[in-house]
Image: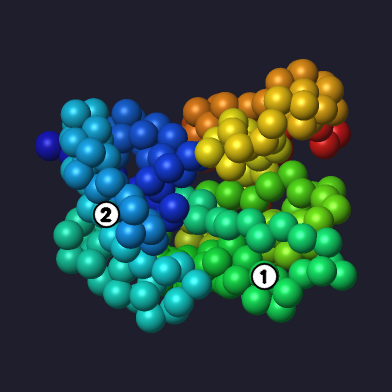
Amino acid sequence: MEERKVALVTGGTRGIGKEIAKAFAQEGYDLIINYVSNNTDIKSLETEFNEIGSKVLFIKADVSDFASCEEMLKQAIQNFGRIDTLVNNAGITRDNLLMRMKEEEFDTVIGINLKGVFNVTKQVIPYMIKKRAGNIVNVSSVVGVCGNAGQCNYSASKAGIIGFTKSLAKELASRNIRVNAVAPGFITTDMTESLNDTIKETISTQIPLKRMGEAREVAKVVKFLASDDASYITGQVINIDGGMVM
């Protein structure tokens, strides 16, 4: 019987990350799901994924900490012996105008959103190189493409991910490892749900498709990029934004 593939999804217990993890579970993958919050209800999430038919290992780790990522990968390999797909999704915001932004607000966002991608990917690629196969999908953002007032830290981190993606794709192509990124626009998540209706309406008028996206719409593109259907695609950034950035 063919071995089940394994996907590692960082920040995979809520929002876009959870939908990405579910999409891979439905595709027949077993999962390693990274999280950091003590409030995460692991038991109910485990049941949810088991019902889909996936084995799932939840690992608490701060992706901004290199040693934590090293330990996470040790646990992952001990349990599954392989990682076929890595989705670097973990991310936070600490929005503020630059003149008011604290150093800690800048450093924390860069540490998790950008250095976290380095920390996790650095641990994963030796296993992919050994197999001469693998897929990496990094979750950037349209603000990494076009910027956004009040988000210098977040925009810088997401733009950095795009540069990281293109450079790593060139490094790993000869090893049959593909590296791509998605750049979501305004997606309905816990983060956007806290916005009032007036702000949501204003946002929608700026989007050619006149609506916010759904997390599952991002997940489907991530799943496609990691599939054999995308076997000739690497180093690309796919905007999932309803036409906001053209």
Residue most toward the bottom? 67
Q: Secondary structure at mark 1?
A: helix
In the rendered image, is residue 166 in sight?
A: no
Q: Which residue is mark 2?
A: 58
Q: CA distance from mark 1 to mark 2?
A: 28 Å
Q: Position of residue 36 (x, y in %)?
A: 39, 61
State which quarter of the image contains the C terminus: top right
Mark 1, residue position: 105
Look at 24% across and 33% down and name the residue there.
48
Of 104 and 166, which appears nearest the observer? 104
Where 87 falls versus 71 (above or below)? Answer: above
Q: Earlier in the sequence, mark 1 or mark 2?
A: 2
Residue at image point 38% right, 72% down = 69
- Residue 117 image offset from top left, x and y in percent: 54, 64
x, y percent for residue 66: 44, 78
Number of marks present in the image shown = 2
Q: 43 or 173, which is in the foreground? A: 43
Taking depth in this image into account, of 213 and 177 the one nearest to the observer is 213
Label 1: how many Cα within 10 Å (few below 14, some 14–19, many 20+) = some
Expressed as whole percent of the image width and height from the top left, the position of residue 158 reads 69, 57
Residue type at mark 1: give it.
Answer: Glu
What residue is at 64 percent from the left and 51 percent from the top? 140
Q: Is residue 36 above or below residue 7?
A: below
Compared with 120, 140 (above or below) is above
Q: On the image, which quarter does residue 171 sit in?
A: bottom right
Residue 142 visible in the picture: yes
